[in-house]
Amino acid sequence: MTGDEGWTAVCRDGDLQVERGAAALVGDVQVALFLTYDGGLHAIDNRDPFTGAGVLSRGIVGSRGGRPTVASPLHKQVFDLERGVCLDDETVTVPVYGVRSRAGLIEVRVR
């Protein structure tokens, strides 16, 4: 369901597991959602730019230099969850999407 200003509800607050990714389809975009130990919500494109496979939601969540990250499950490239930059090749990025918790729902805005 799409709400104000293009926000789409994708799940309930309690549905995301800490440090485990989940995939959601928002329109025709596959989004990878993450809840980090500090309570941070993150949403990036689910497509691994190196292989084209929709797998980033299945990656290993961690941190590098205090920034939340996810490592692709295929070739282990690490992406910054806040900026979308690949930390192993900074010329490669994934789109980062708006994500928020509102009225008990996790909402994503894909532009």
Image: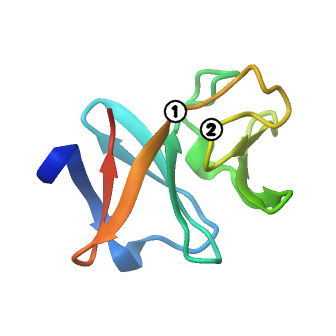
Q: Quadrant of the C terminus?
A: top left
Residue 91 vs residue 103: left or right? Answer: right
The residue carrying pointer 2 sits among few (fewer than 14), some (14 to 19) or many (20 or more) residues within 10 Å by Cα, namely many
* Mark linked to residue 58: none
The answer to which of 62 and 55 lies nearer the viewer is: 62
Q: Whole-percent x and y of residue 6?
A: 20, 43
Q: Which percent across, then down, holds residue 45?
A: 50, 37
Amino acid marked by disc 1 = Pro
Q: Is residue 103 visible?
A: yes
Residue 96 is left or right of residue 51, and the answer is left
Q: x and y percent of residue 80 in the render?
A: 70, 46
97 versus 38 height, above or below: above
Q: Is residue 88 above or below residue 33?
A: above
Q: Is residue 2 visible?
A: no
Query: What residue lies at 59% left-to-right and 39% top-to-bottom?
Result: 55
Q: Give how far apart the Cα atoms at labels 1 and 2 are.
A: 6 Å
